[in-house]
Image (tube, rainbow, N blue to C red):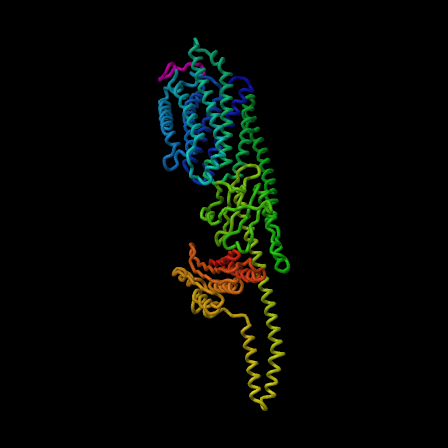
């Protein structure tokens, strides 16, 4: 040490800070990664090597420099092992980050192969020399400028002469790999790598500056040793404060490099294998930096002031408990903020009121307010779109956007579905859409794919974290499920009211017909039976006809032919017998696989499909004919996941041609859409005016 309080305090504080932060970073990388990949092991081990070196460095700075202190020479020699490993560890980590070990040949590997082998060989040679022990002068030989050792090159120990070449080569090759990286196979890797590159380049430039300072220091010590005339303590006194100042500068530059490395590691998860950065890890990193800075300053200050030994642990304990109190306060503040963010998602949507008040519109289930709260308060995004898909699309309705009312051109959902599975949290849109959408969050339920939450860039230009995407995914799935459940309940309640009204109307009609028409005729027939049997017989015949008409008007029971012929057979018979006259051509397409899939359907599912398909065909016969021939195509086919799909398509006027007819047809299909959703299937309608109408039914 230099005996200058402020300089000694700064040097020891920086050394302790680097030690604490590197050890935290190394352990965190190893414990929080998805898998122990090569990059994680290299980054974690390299950080621990650096932390170990600065632990030894702090021990050397904190001890008295007397020739009788044997520990100093031990730490000096052990520290050189870690010092030699650290540049190679940084270089290897950068090579992994840049894609050096990706499968297949790439320009980075061809360009760096020779340099990597050179650095690996040089580090192995230096480690071998250090194992011999004799090639390295002792610590006290160095501070007294006696550089005599077993292996010398130009009056300088071979280890000290080769180390500048080694460290400069590692840093220059690392910089080249960062500026011209190779390909990456990591999900979202290119985007994260692009965002982290400025931090890593800055850290490498700082380490390159450290390398230059180390080389300059070694040359200065060498020339000072060459110019000395005798062994004395004057050399040590003359060099002590410049060396301490240079040591503090080097430690400070390394500390900045460690901060930049930590920022790249926790903000973009470039080493842990996570597809998204974690907000919690970033918060813990900030706390670790504050704790390392505070504790290192306190401990170094207590040591530099030469206070009694009890002062340092007491001050450290006070700092620790104060820091813990701050963490407690922050945790409660974050908890309250989380509760405020959750309120829009757990607020009542008045579903019960909707069931009791038939006049309320479908939009009474308000998705826009929680969607805006999610996008504005939780995600901080500029643009978003919640798009239903799959079985829930017919129940949820049109996509919701943020900001409200903005028009967006959305990517193809089927293409996106092929890229995403239930385990995929986010799919980057590369390149982004013209409207500015940059990512898609697939939404899933127990029944499969239900929608997508498209996201634009964040308002602050940052990166979406894993916690934010998890909240967005859960919230999007809940909002779609809430809207579908509310719409399904509303439709079922409306169906129940309609059936009750129809039953009441049928009962009144039946009572009126029996009371006003049937009973008087029977009474008259009874009076006329004896005098005019032919007239009575005619009256009874009329009564029979009226009763037959009433029976015909009653709601039809599930067809028995469905159980006898199966779904496809019963549907084809119904089309041929009841609806053949409604079309100029009726075309049926059925594959053997579809027939097999239909035979395996549960009875309730088959019945629901039958009535929905019959309703679609009836709508086509009633509403699709214009002033041209009308044809109907019915196709039965299998789905990739093993279900059955029925497609009913006509070449009529389309749903938009007549508003009244279209509204009636839409109400009938709306009912069957709900019934299909109840059994896990879906009903979708595609129509183009004066071209076609296509109804697609999919089983679960």
Q: Is residue 213 magenta?
A: no
Which residue: 57% across, 81% down? 543
Q: Is residue 4 visible?
A: yes
Whole-percent x and y of residue 597?
41, 60
- On screen, 404 above or below 265? below
Q: Is residue 485 above or below residue 332?
A: below
Please tell me which residue lies in front, 91 or 136. Answer: 91
Residue 146 is inside the magenta segment: yes
Q: Position of residue 169 (x, y in %)?
A: 41, 24
Front one among 507 and 86: 507
Label the magenta part by its dominant secondary structure. loop
Which of the two residues, 316 or 451, is positioned nearer the viewer here? Answer: 451
State which quadrant residue 89 falls in.
top left
> In this view, which residue lies farthest toward the top?
229
The residue most toward the bottom is: 531
What is the span of residues highlighted in magenta in the rendered image?
A: 143-155
Residue 467 in sight from this viewpoint: no
Residue 375 picture location, percent across and down: 58, 44
Percent coordinates x, y for residue 366 in the rendering: 61, 51
């Amino acid at each position: 040490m230099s005996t200058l309080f402020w300089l000694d305090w700064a040097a020891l504080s920086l050394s302790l800070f680097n030690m604490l932060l590197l050890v935290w970073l190394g352990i965190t990388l190893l414990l929080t990664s998805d898998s122990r990949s090569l990059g994680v092991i290299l980054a974690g081990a390299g950080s621990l090597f650096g932390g170990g070196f600065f632990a030894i460095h702090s021990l050397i700075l904190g001890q008295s420099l007397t020739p009788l202190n044997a520990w100093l020479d031990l730490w000096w020699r052990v520290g050189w092992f870690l010092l030699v490993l650290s540049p190679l560890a940084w270089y290897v980590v950068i090579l992994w980050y840049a894609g050096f070990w990706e499968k297949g040949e790439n320009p980075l590997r061809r360009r760096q192969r020779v340099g990597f082998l050179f650095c690996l060989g040089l580090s192995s040679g230096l480690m071998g020399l250090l194992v011999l022990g004799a090639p390295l002068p002792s610590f006290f030989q160095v501070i007294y400028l006696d550089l005599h050792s077993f292996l010398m090159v130009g009056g300088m120990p071979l280890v000290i002469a080769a180390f500048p070449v080694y460290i400069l080569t590692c840093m220059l090759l690392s910089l080249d790999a960062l500026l011209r990286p190779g390909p990456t196979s990591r999900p979202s890797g290119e985007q994260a790598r692009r965002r982290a590159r400025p931090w890593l380049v800055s850290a490498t430039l700082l380490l390159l500056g450290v390398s230059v300072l180390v080389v300059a220091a070694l040359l200065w010590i060498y020339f000072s040793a060459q110019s000395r005339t005798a062994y004395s303590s004057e050399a040590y006194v003359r060099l002590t404060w410049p060396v301490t100042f240079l040591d503090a500068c080097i430690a400070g530059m390394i500390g900045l490099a460690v901060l930049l490395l930590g920022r790249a590691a926790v903000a973009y998860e470039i080493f842990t294998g996570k597809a998204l950065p974690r907000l919690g890890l970033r918060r813990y990193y900030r706390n670790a930096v504050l704790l390392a800075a505070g504790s290192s300053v306190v401990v170094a200050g207590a040591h530099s002031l030469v206070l009694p030994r009890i002062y340092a642990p007491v001050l450290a304990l006070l700092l620790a408990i104060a820091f813990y109190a701050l963490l407690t306060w922050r945790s409660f503040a974050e908890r309250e903020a989380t509760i405020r963010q959750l309120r829009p998602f757990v607020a009542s949507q008045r579903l019960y009121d909707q069931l009791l008040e038939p006049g309320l519109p479908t939009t009474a289930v308000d998705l826009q307010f929680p969607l805006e709260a999610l996008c504005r308060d939780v995600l901080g995004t500029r643009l978003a779109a919640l798009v239903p898909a799959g079985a829930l699309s017919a129940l949820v309705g049109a996509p919701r956007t943020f900001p409200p009312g903005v028009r967006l051109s959305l990517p193809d959902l089927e293409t996106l579905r092929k890229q995403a599975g239930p385990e995929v949290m986010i799919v980057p849109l590369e390149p982004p859409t013209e409207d500015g959408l940059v990512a898609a969050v697939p939404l899933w339920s127990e029944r499969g794919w239900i929608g997508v939450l498209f996201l634009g860039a964040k308002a602050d230009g940052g990166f979406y974290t894993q916690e934010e995407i998890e909240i967005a995914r859960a919230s999007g799935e809940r909002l779609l499920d809430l809207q579908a459940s509310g719409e399904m309940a509303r439709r079922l309640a409306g169906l129940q009211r309609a059936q009750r009204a129809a039953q009441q109307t049928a009962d009144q009609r039946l009572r009126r017909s029996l009371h006003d028409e049937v009973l008087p005729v029977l009474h008259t027939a009874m009076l006329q039976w004896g005098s005019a049997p032919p007239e009575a017989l005619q009256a009874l015949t009329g009564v029979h006809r009226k009763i037959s008409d009433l029976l015909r008007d009653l709601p039809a029971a599930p067809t028995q032919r469905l159980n006898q012929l199966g779904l496809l057979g019963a549907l084809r018979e119904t089309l041929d017998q009841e609806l053949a006259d409604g079309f100029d051509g009726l075309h049926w397409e059925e594959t053997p696989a579809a027939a097999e899939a239909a035979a395996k359907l549960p009875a309730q599912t088959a019945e629901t499909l039958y009535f929905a398909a019959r309703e679609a065909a009836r709508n086509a016969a009633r509403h699709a004919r214009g002033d041209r021939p009308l044809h109907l195509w019915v196709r039965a086919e299998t789905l990739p996941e093993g279900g059955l799909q029925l497609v009913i398509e006509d070449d009529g006027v389309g749903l938009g041609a007549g508003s009244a007819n279209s509204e009636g047809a839409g109400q009938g299909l709306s009912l069957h859409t709900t019934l299909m959703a109840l059994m896990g299937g879906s009903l979708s309608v595609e129509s183009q005016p004066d071209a076609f109408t296509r109804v697609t039914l999919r089983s679960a």
